[in-house]
């Protein structure tokens, strides 16, 4: 069995640290807020590396939007006092490409409850 995955984490996006939480509830909250499925969007994000450079440029805006929405949901879930609204969250986020480590951290945290569940589930007999 793999080690337990952390489901709470402080992640620096641009110039600000946010405390984030991911749980089974995250995927449902994400769907309620966006009307989209969390795992489908994470798969969409992960496909970008397989695209040509031209295709990557055309998709970057969509990918960033998905990353911000996923981040916002997990920030709200951890402590809603960190953000007043999605719009304010975006307005207060600067320097997002100073480092891109946050992107992988957000994705890993978002899938942690699901991947952890898959790792610890008993095999079908």
Image (spheres, helix red, strand yellow):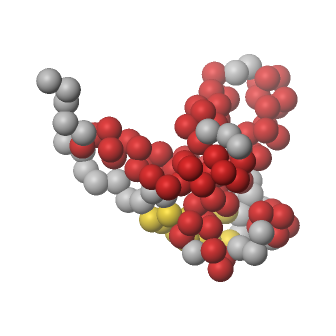
Query: Is residue 56 positioned above or below 33 on the image?
Result: above
Q: At x 75% / y 75%, what residue is drawn?
A: 84
Q: Give the image location of residue 18, x and y in percent.
A: 61, 70
Q: Quadrant location of residue 99?
A: bottom right
**Residue displayed at 25% across by 50% down:** 3
Give the quadrant of the N terminus: top left
Q: In this view, does 64 lie above or below 17?
A: above
Q: Of all residues shown, which one is farthest toward the left?
A: 125
Residue 13 pos. (x, y %): 67, 62
Q: Position of residue 16 (x, y in %)?
A: 68, 72
Quadrant position of residue 98: bottom right
**Left or right placement of residue 63 versus residue 91 in this view:** left
71 horizontally vs 107: left or right: right
Residue 105 seen in this snapshot: no
Whether residue 87 is visible, yes or no, is yes
The residue sitting at 79% across, 23% down in the picture is 55
**Which percent across, then down, holds residue 125?**
14, 24
Residue at the image position 82 percent from the left and 69 percent from the top:
88
């Amino acid at each position: 069995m793999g080690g337990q995955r952390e489901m709470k984490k402080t992640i620096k996006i641009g110039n600000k640290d946010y405390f984030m939480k991911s749980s089974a509830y995250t995927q449902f909250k994400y769907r309620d807020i966006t009307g989209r499925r969390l795992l489908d969007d994470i798969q969409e994000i992960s496909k970008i590396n397989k695209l040509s450079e031209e295709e990557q440029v055309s998709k970057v805006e969509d990918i960033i939007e998905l990353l911000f929405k996923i981040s916002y949901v997990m920030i709200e879930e951890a402590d809603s006092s960190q953000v007043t609204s999605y719009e304010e969250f975006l307005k207060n986020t600067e320097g997002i490409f100073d480092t891109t480590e946050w992107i992988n951290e957000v994705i890993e945290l978002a899938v942690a409850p699901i991947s952890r569940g898959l790792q610890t589930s008993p095999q079908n007999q």
